[in-house]
Amino acid sequence: MTEEAIPQRQTLEGEAALDLWRQGPGAWNKWIFRHPRWNISFEGGNFSIERNAEGNLSFNGYYFGQGDVDFSKATFGDGDVSFSKANFGDGSVSFCEATFGKGNVDFSKATFGEGDVNFSHTSFGDGDAYFTGANFGNGAVNFDHATFGNGGVYFTAITFGKGNVNFSKTIFGDGGLNFEHTSFGDGDVDFSQATFGEGGVHFTGTTFGKGKVRFPQTTFGSGTVNFMDADFGEGDVNFSQATFGDGGVHFTLAAFGKGRVDFSKTIFGKGDVYFEYTNFGNGPVHFDRATFNDGDVTFRQAQFGKDNLIFSKARFGNGDLNFSFATFEDSQLYFSETTFGKGNIDFSSTNISNLFLSSTTFENSFVKLNNTNLTRLILTPKYFASGSIEAQGLSIKKQGVFDLPSSASKLKSLNLHSASFDGPLTLKGNLSIIPDLRATRYAHQVDLSALTVKLQRRWQKPGLRSDQLHMKAASEVGVISRLSYKFARKKWINLRHFNKLRRLWKRHCWPIKLSRAAEDPLDAARLRRLKEFAETNKDHQAALRFSADENRARRWIETPWLGSILDMTFSFFCNYGQSILRPSFWLGVIFALSMYAYKAKQIPKLVTDSWTDWAQAALLSASNSLPFLPQSRELRTGALKALYDTTDPSSYVDALMITQGVLSFIFLFLIGLGLRNRFRL
């Protein structure tokens, strides 16, 4: 069996091709229709000497038949070059290593057939390059290593076929690149290691097919980068290690398909980054090790599929990060070892399956989780500066962990008001504020065993009129002022004295507070809620701590003045029943002082030089301190006779014994209270 010989195509080239071209499109197209299968070659041609009177070169409307078309290494010189509405047929087209000068290059509405189109290593000058409305067939399109000058580059409204489109290592100037409303076929689209100048890069409304979309190690200038409303098709999308300039980056309303979306190790500039209303499809999304500068980053109302979203080891600047109203379909969001700047981090009204913020660093960040719905939340940062966590209305179906580091002592607020926990909740940390768990709902255990809080209090400064601190005092000032004014009108008090009295009252806020008052009057209610959690979990020690701080927070604000004095005394002598040492010490002090007083009042004629007198005074003091012991009465009688020669001494000694007995009873009660609280089962 013999193969049928394929006839070799003839080629129109060199001076013959130039002569036919010089005759214009009419003669050219007539010849091509008679010889449709011939190849056309202008390889290495010098068109700079072929320009018309206006200095232009025109291939407008030329038809190149079914053969290959070769302009490789051609030189076009300075001036405009136009291939507008040219039809390159179904053969391959090569402008490889061609050189265009400073004029505009126009391929608008040109038609390329099924062959490959090659502009690799082509050099475009500083004029604009137009491919607007061009139609590429199913062959591969290569612009790799091409160089564009500082003019605009327009690939708008273009249709590419099924072949791959390659712009890898292409250099674009400062004039900007425009691919708006362009449609790519099912081949791969590759801009890897491309360099864009300072102009804008626009892919608005661009449609990509089933192939991969690759922008790895691409460098963007300071202009705006716009992929708004772009459709990335079903393939993988790769922007890994890309570098964006200081202009805004827009992926708003963009749609990603089933493939992997990779922005790992990408560097974003100072401009804002927008992924608002973006649909990330069902593939994994990677922003691990990405770097964001001080611009805002927003994923507001973005939609994520079933795979994971990873920001591990990413670094955010001082701009805001916004995930509010975003939707996650069974996906997990990882921020392990991520660094956040001073901006707000907003997850408000977001539906997330699992949110992991482990080993993260927060620099004065304001974290918002208001009305967020989560299956699991793990918040275990490595460092947390003086920021805030606001999570009102937070809902967690399973596990919730807030394990805060020692640096979280600078935290300004931890607000879980009205939150809902259907699984176990763990709160750990040494905080200088009171977490707000008021109106929270929980169905499982709440672990507060490793949580310590510090009530923020301050002295009431003269002239301070804070409604938060002195609401009651303010009302008292009003009453006194009205009464004083009434008396002043009746000449009972001089008006000058009245004004002086009112200023004095307002300056010192009488009655003067004898200890510091809570900075926030709501801290008492917050501590009361923490105490309820601890009591429910049978954590008696934690309940005692929270109860003590609750009383301190109520002092001078909710508790009356005299009650506050009593509360302050209770705190000083036994730390609200938490201390055994304090009342024991003061019981010893009462014993020693009473013994000394009894010895000092001894009848002179009964005084001896031995220690017997002190021993009797000690026995009298001990019998009064411990009157419930069976031997106390007998010891007291013997000591009275030894010191005063009677069982009915002076009124001074009687008053001293009564005072010692009352004080000893109080401190014994406080010791018993401390023992009961210490060993409570």
Image: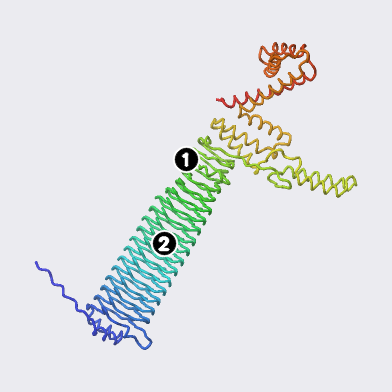
**Which callout, 2 or 1, points at the residue further toward the start of the chain?**
2
| Mark 1 surroundings: few (<14), some (14-19) or many (≥20) residues within 10 A | some
- Compare residues 208 and 565 and report the one nearer the observer: 565
- Compare residues 146 and 647 and report the one nearer the observer: 647
Please provide percent x and percent y for residue 495.
86, 49
Q: Which colouring convention does the figure follow? A: rainbow
Q: Is residue 655 above or below residue 391?
A: above
Numbered circle sitting on residue 645:
none
Q: What element carries label 1?
A: loop
| Mark 2 surroundings: few (<14), some (14-19) or many (≥20) residues within 10 A | many
Which image quadrant is residue 521 in?
top right
* C-alpha gap between disc 2 and disc 1: 38 Å
**In the image: residue 326, left or right of residue 39:** right
**Depth-wise, is mark 2 or mark 1 nearer the camera?**
2
Residue at 49% of width from left, 61% of height from top? 272
Q: What residue type is labelled 2?
A: Thr
Locate the N terminus by quadrant: bottom left
Q: What residue type is labelled 1?
A: Gln
Please provide percent x and percent y for residue 273.
47, 60
Q: In this view, does 138 lie above or below 496?
A: below
Residue at 32% of width from left, 77% of height from top? 99
**In the image: residue 645, left or right of residue 147:** right
- Compare residues 663 and 600 and report the one nearer the observer: 600
Which image quadrant is residue 89 in?
bottom left
**Numbered marks: total:** 2
Please provide percent x and percent y for residue 278.
45, 58
Residue 592 visible somewhere in the drawing: yes
Q: Mark 2 points at which residue?
A: 243
Q: Mark 1 points at which residue?
A: 399
Please provide percent x and percent y for residue 38.
22, 78
Q: Is mark 2 on a helix, strand or loop?
A: loop
